[in-house]
Image (cartoon, rainbow, N blue to C red):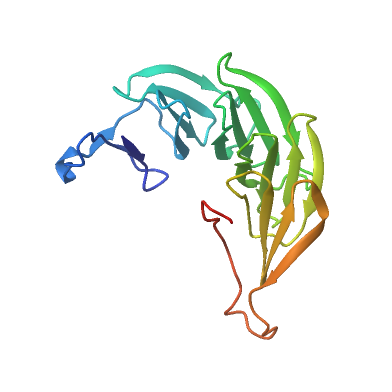
């Protein structure tokens, strides 16, 4: 089954297939009682549940086979805060749901108990969190803000390990051992065990040209 939301204010579309014979007629809009934009749609690692996160902080847990709403909880109190959820990501073990906010925080919610487990605050106050990425082993978390600042966190110790500026994109490799950062014309690759000795890949040697700047990157599944 594939879940897709093409536009923030558009419907969530459900495509169900067991024999790859689906057509456009099989795409069914999923109507939810949430009058808000979605920032994340993600299948739980166990494959049995679907999590939808809206901008106002409402998280809906649906059964993946029937799209029946099993639970719904709100992570932001609209009556006492003007903050919005700007991005979200499930921990690889499916037990923690991380949500970045427009006022520079990452809310770590316990999915099972539906309670707030912890809050990470960005060093750059009130900078909106634009992206979140967990390492595959779940030990580390990458956060990026709209001020082009990237932070590396140790989730077990709830500690900020590293902060880097002028970063437009960041991600862990599939093994969780390495991290790549995009800084204008360079890609910086560092080991999670040795942040202070990164390797720089220069994309362009033309310092006078803006046409060769890199805005994003992806890892292949086999980095060897």
Q: Residue furthest top?
A: 113
In this orientation, which residue lies closer to the viewer: 90 or 114?
90
In this orientation, which residue lies closer to the viewer: 211 or 82?
211
For the C terminus, the image quarter is bottom right
Q: Is residue 106 above or below residue 7?
A: above
148 lies left or right of 66 = right
71 lies left or right of 217 = left
Q: Is residue 16 above or below residue 142?
A: above
Q: Residue furthest right?
A: 196
Quarter location, residue 95: top right
> Where is residue 28 drawn, in percent x and y?
23, 36
Q: Residue furthest front?
A: 224
Q: Is residue 116 above or below residue 207?
A: above
In this orientation, which residue lies closer to the viewer: 127 or 223?
223
Count of numbered badges drawn on the protein: 0
> Where is residue 33 drawn, in percent x and y?
37, 25
> Where is residue 181 drawn, in percent x and y?
67, 58
For the N terminus, the image quarter is top left
The residue positioned 77% from the left and 55% from the top of the image is 164
The residue positioned 35% from the left and 27% from the top of the image is 32
Quarter location, residue 4: top left
54 lies left or right of 175 = left
The residue positioned 81% from the left and 50% from the top of the image is 194
> Where is residue 114 drawn, in percent x and y?
57, 17
190 lies left or right of 222 = right
The residue positioned 63% from the left and 74% from the top of the image is 203
In this orientation, which residue lies closer to the viewer: 96 or 57?
96
């Amino acid at each position: 089954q594939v879940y897709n939301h093409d536009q923030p204010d558009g419907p969530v579309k459900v495509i169900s297939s067991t024999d790859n014979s689906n057509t456009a007629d099989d795409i069914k809009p999923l109507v939810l009682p949430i009058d808000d934009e979605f920032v994340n749609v993600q299948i739980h690692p166990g494959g049995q549940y679907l999590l939808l996160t809206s901008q106002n902080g409402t998280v809906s847990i649906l059964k993946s086979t029937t799209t029946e709403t099993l639970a719904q909880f709100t992570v932001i109190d609209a009556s006492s805060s003007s903050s919005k959820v700007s991005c979200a990501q499930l921990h690889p073990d499916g037990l923690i749901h991380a949500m970045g906010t427009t006022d520079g925080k990452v809310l770590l919610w316990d999915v099972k108990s539906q309670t707030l487990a912890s809050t990470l605050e960005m060093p750059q106050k009130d900078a909106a969190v634009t992206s979140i990425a967990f390492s595959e082993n779940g030990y580390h978390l990458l956060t990026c803000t709209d001020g082009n600042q990237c932070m590396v966190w140790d989730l077990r110790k709830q500690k900020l390990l590293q902060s880097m500026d002028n970063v437009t994109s960041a991600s862990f490799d599939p093994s969780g051992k390495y991290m790549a950062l995009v800084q204008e014309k360079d890609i910086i690759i560092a080991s999670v065990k040795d942040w202070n000795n990164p390797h720089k890949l220069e994309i362009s040697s033309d310092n006078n040209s803006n046409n060769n700047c890199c805005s994003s990157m992806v890892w292949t599944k086999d980095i060897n």
